[in-house]
Amino acid sequence: MNKDIATPVRTKDILKKYGFSFKKSLGQNFLIDTNILKRIVDHAQLTEESGAIEIGPGIGALTEQLAKSSKKVTAFEIDQRLLPILSDTLAPYDNVNIIHGDVLKADVKKVIEEEFTGFSDLMVVANLPYYVTTPIILKLLSENLPIRGIVCMLQKEVADRIAAKPGTKEYGSLSIAIQYYTEAETVMIVPKTVFMPQPNVDSAVIRLTKRVNPIVEVLDEEFFFIVTRASFAQRRKTILNNLTSQLPDGKTKKELILAALEASEVDPSRRGETLSIAEFGRLSDALLPNFK
């Protein structure tokens, strides 16, 4: 008998045993295909010495595969109803620890210090709840955690935006925010049919490999992100119009914005999606003295 958690029959049995019902508000879609889970874990390139952090373990389907491939797994689960299920399904594995809590509110650096002292390799591997994917990824990257990277399942449309290149319609401030910290690549497309319940959207697995240093060196990181967000506020507008309408006192400082664009060799009539991250870096540095 196949003992893996991630089969349709075993998943149904577990849900029935505990009378578990899915909460739409928590974005719960459980994977029911062991091969897909094994491939996700393969993309994380874990060894017997690696630590793995998981977010939203559900009934433990991915957790189980991580436990088999790494030294230790620590998972954050927000839904209290899943705690007894996880302690049952993951009973065979003594290298798993479940933390009941919201990862967005957690001090993840402190958790890493407590859970993974002495580990030289640490990866985040998760089937993320789709409604909070972006805030979770940005939190993990901006807090400068000692992780090698993130492998996660998310909505395909969001994966496309994260990995997008300049000049494409998917490219935007999210692409820049994540590529600033990591090299981003979509490694798998996942059909709806391997989930219970089936989501309404296609899914993808993305691998984010943390850069040693951000892709560009900027004078003020916070301001750099303000400029990139402002540049995409209305996609059909030129970069000059977006910056003028979005930056504080932009309308009265239009001449200064024009001068900064000229200094950074960016044509004011271009649109945000045509600028590379390096160009945004030069532009934010040129704007900084007059807006901060």
Image: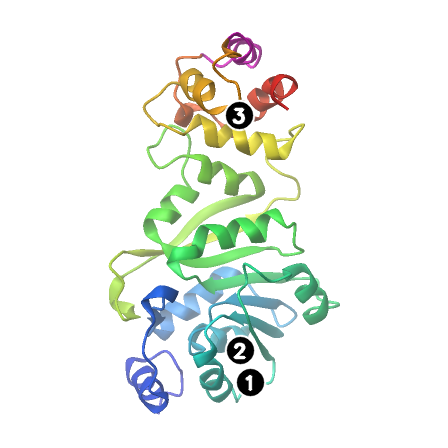
- Could you tell me residue 46's position as x and y percent? 57, 65
Closer to viewer: mark 2 or mark 1 = 1
- Indicate whether 52 appears above or below 241: below
Examine the structure image and report whether residue 262 is included in the region drawn in magenta: yes
- Specify the quadrant that holds the N terminus: bottom left
Q: Position of residue 245 (x, y in %)?
A: 43, 21
Q: Nearer the viewer, residue 154 or 206?
A: 154
**84 vs 268: above or below:** below
Residue closest to the eye, 258 or 246: 246
Residue identifier under label 2: 68
Q: Which residues are magenta?
A: 255-267
Count neighbours of disc 1 (C-alpha within 10 A) and say few if under 14, some if 14 to 19, many if 20 or more. Answer: some
Residue under label 3: 280
Q: Residue at x 45, y 40 (%)?
A: 174
Identity of the amino acid at label 3? Phe
Please, is residue 32 above or below residue 261 in the view?
below
Q: Quadrant of residue 263?
A: top right
